[in-house]
Image (spheres, helix red, strand yellow):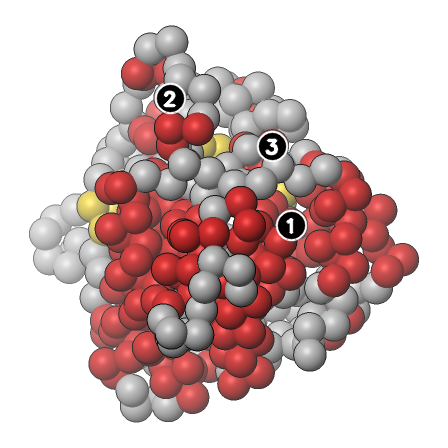
Amino acid sequence: ALDEAGVEYDIFDDVMVEPTDVSFQTAIAFATDGGFDGFVAVGGGSVIDTAKAANLYSTWPADFLAYVTGPIGEGKAPPGPLKPLIAVPTTSGTGSETTGNAVLDFPEIGTKSAIAHRYLRPALGVIDPDNVRDLPPMITACSGLDVLCHALESFTAIRFDQRPKPAEPHLRTPYQGSNPVADIWSREAIRIGANCLVDAVKDPDATHARGHMLLASTLAGIGFGNAGVHLPHALSYPISRLSRGYFPPDYPTEHSLVPHGMSVVLTAPAIFRWTADAAPEAHREAAILLGASPHEVGVDNAGDAIANRFTDVMKAIGMPNGLNGVGITEDDLDALVRGTLSQQRLLVISPKEPTERDVRQLFADSMTLW
């Protein structure tokens, strides 16, 4: 299509699954040398996030840590808008086509961080179900669980009016906390995910389910891009760093890897049990959206209902049985806690502020899930 339109282009295909600071900088150098007028990202969240970083730093050059969120980076805002970025997602998970976030790993310090600003949001997202029609089962499963966690975390986050007000509107952080606008998108994403994820994974011919999971990914992205995500994502980043000898089926990688959606969901049951008493009505509604009976779920058992629904889905689509299933043990607790406590932009979105002891217990409770 670009050839037919007479558009000159070059292709960057050195994107890393779960990108790092080094892989981002490789893409940035490519974009800087190319002097491009715009970008098209065709792929999953790793591809789209890499394109966001390449666009940012080639448009507004700066020291690499300048735009990375604290405490690792300086968290500076870009001076102005970026070049046009068209995002074409080929997985049903990250919702990166809708957000101003680009997540990256820092292997040398054992944690993940992000670049987050509304200017990173793509100018256009092309949401085409044909692009996920042949997505392998495990990638469908992990990306779909990421969708559910995005929507549930957004929906159960601290309420926007419980957070400190910025002095000026333009000083608002990217994540606002749960709010009536974000809730609209999150509700529908939860409902679709609950009804379609298992079929999308287990039946390659379930085109309706696969297409709707892509829609849910975009809806959840709009929701959490406004409200934010909290503890499952905060705890997921050190999990991704500590994969030992785990090679997930269907992923094209030569190194051990805990896929992002998998790393998020492994602690979700324990977390939602723990956060439920801080936002009981939101958790109850979330449990019902996931398929629990309204007559059987109250504010006192909503956390258990969410956790049970998660474990049922995880069993059905072949997820490992907790952190032990990906090679993580109690010996890793110190590193897991340390990696989580650096995720302040996510921890502050939790409906319930965790202490270091709380985080340790959540990991301990997630070693085995059933």
Earlier sequence position, callout 3 versus callout 2: 2
Where residue 333 appears, as percent x and y from the top left, is 83, 52
Query: Relative to residue 114, is residue 359 depicted above or below?
Result: below
- The tag on residue 235 is 1
**Cβ atoms under marks 2 and 1 closer than 8 Å:** no
Q: Residues within 10 Å of mark 1 (few under 14, many from 20)?
A: many
Determine the secondary structure under disc 2. Answer: loop
| Mark 1 / mark 3, whichever is N-terminal | 1
- Residue at 36% from the left image edge and 81% from the top image edge: 200
Please tell me which residue is depicted at 65% across the width and 50% down the height of the picture: 235
| Residue 218 point in image, percent of width and height | 29, 56
Disc 2 to disc 1, C-alpha distance: 24 Å
Q: Which residue has dot 3 on it?
A: 344
Can you identify the residue that label 2 sits on? 172
Q: Given the image, on which type of amino acid does mark 3 rest?
A: Gln
Q: Tags 1 and 3 in contact by the CB under 8 Å rule? A: no
Residue 180 shows up from this direction: yes
Of residue 124 and residue 162, the one placed in the foreground of this image is 162
Residue under the image location 26 percent in, 71 percent down: 212
Q: In the displayed structure, does residue 177 sit left or right of residue 233?
A: left
What's the residue type where badge 1 is placed? Answer: Leu
Quarter of the view holding residue 168: top left
Q: Secondary structure at mark 3?
A: helix
Residue 45 or 221: which is nearer the viewer? 221
Q: Quadrant of residue 90?
A: bottom left
| Label number found at residue 81 | none
- The CA distance from mark 3 to mark 2 is 16 Å
